[in-house]
Amino acid sequence: MLVVFNPKSGNGDSDLPEFVRLLRAGGAEVVQRETKKDTPLAEQVNDLHAFDILVAAGGDGTVSSLAYAIRDSGVPLLAFPAGTANLIAQNLDLPTTAPELADLVLAGHCITVDLGEIEVGGKKNGFAMLAGAGADAAMIRDSEDLKEHFGVMAYVLSAMKQLNPKKTTFTLTIDGKTREFEGIGVMAANFGMANYRMPITTDIDPGDGQLTVVLLKAGNLLRLIPNLIDSLRAKLNLGDPLFSGNLETLHACEITVEAADPFPLQYDGELMEETTPFTARILPGAARFITAARKEEVET
């Protein structure tokens, strides 16, 4: 097994040493590699053929970048939760303790899911969760200085600061068809659950060969809370939606997003230097994630 870990994720505080000890006690041969600022993650896995399993220990950006680096290889990947929010691990319904994670890896159950790819100015990156422009990227930007002291609550505090986010006119090219809308952001989602496995919206399936595109029409992020309630009601089969108008969802294999004003970009919590425009596309069945969850349990 190859373990690639980001020492800066989650302030470097995780159960990774105990996890590795348990793997070795279970009979696994484990090689560990630390990510380095000047070494592309793809170089850490250029000998992937010599390993049976890859463990990506870090935040969502580390996990999705490694998943993208080994896409279509068929090698199982564990999203070891060592970051702040660990949304990919939450979407996969992974346990959080070293013994449970070690048992899961040694058992080896996997599901095959899609990955997303974001392209900006000819440069491509992969994402497992979502990529977006606008208010969500601004929230991530504003949370960076808060994460050390507040952990996952940094995102909540940052969202509360987005009480009057910038609006603009977005021009979308969705599988070759063009439309416009006015709003505070656009998200292209592969997985669809936020913290505590709260569904962002309904009908997000990481194995359907499509991105779910979420158009944020609300005046601010806090006004999307009713939509989260609707999504949870739908997941629990509690009836028809009570709220509408704050967002719109559609599906696409590829979408290009342009904005009248430059908007910040993010993918899986990684803030990009570039701004809009961007293109996002689906990579069907590109990843095998280790999880005990069934496919229907990772859908919203």
Image (cartoon, rainbow, N blue to C red):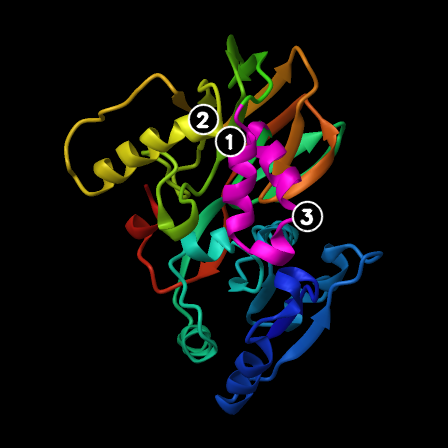
Residue drawn at 31 percent across, 56 percent down: 294
Question: Disc 1 marks which amino acid?
Answer: Ala
Residue drawn at 14 percent across, 32 percent down: 239
Question: Disc 2 marks which amino acid?
Answer: Val
**Mark 3 element type:** loop
Q: Which mark is residue 293?
A: none
Q: Residues within 10 Å of mark 2 (few under 14, many from 20)?
A: some
Write down the region rendered in magenta. 134-163
Q: Which residue is mark 3?
A: 145
Q: Which residue is mark 2?
A: 214
Q: Earlier in the sequence, mark 1 or mark 2?
A: 1
Front of the two marks 2 and 3: 3
Q: Distance between the Cα atoms at labels 1 and 2?
A: 6 Å
Principal SS element in the magenta part?
helix
Q: Quadrant of the C terminus?
A: top left
Q: Residues within 10 Å of mark 1 (few under 14, many from 20)?
A: many
Q: Quadrant of residue 4?
A: bottom right
**Mark 2 element type:** strand
Q: Which residue is mark 1?
A: 188
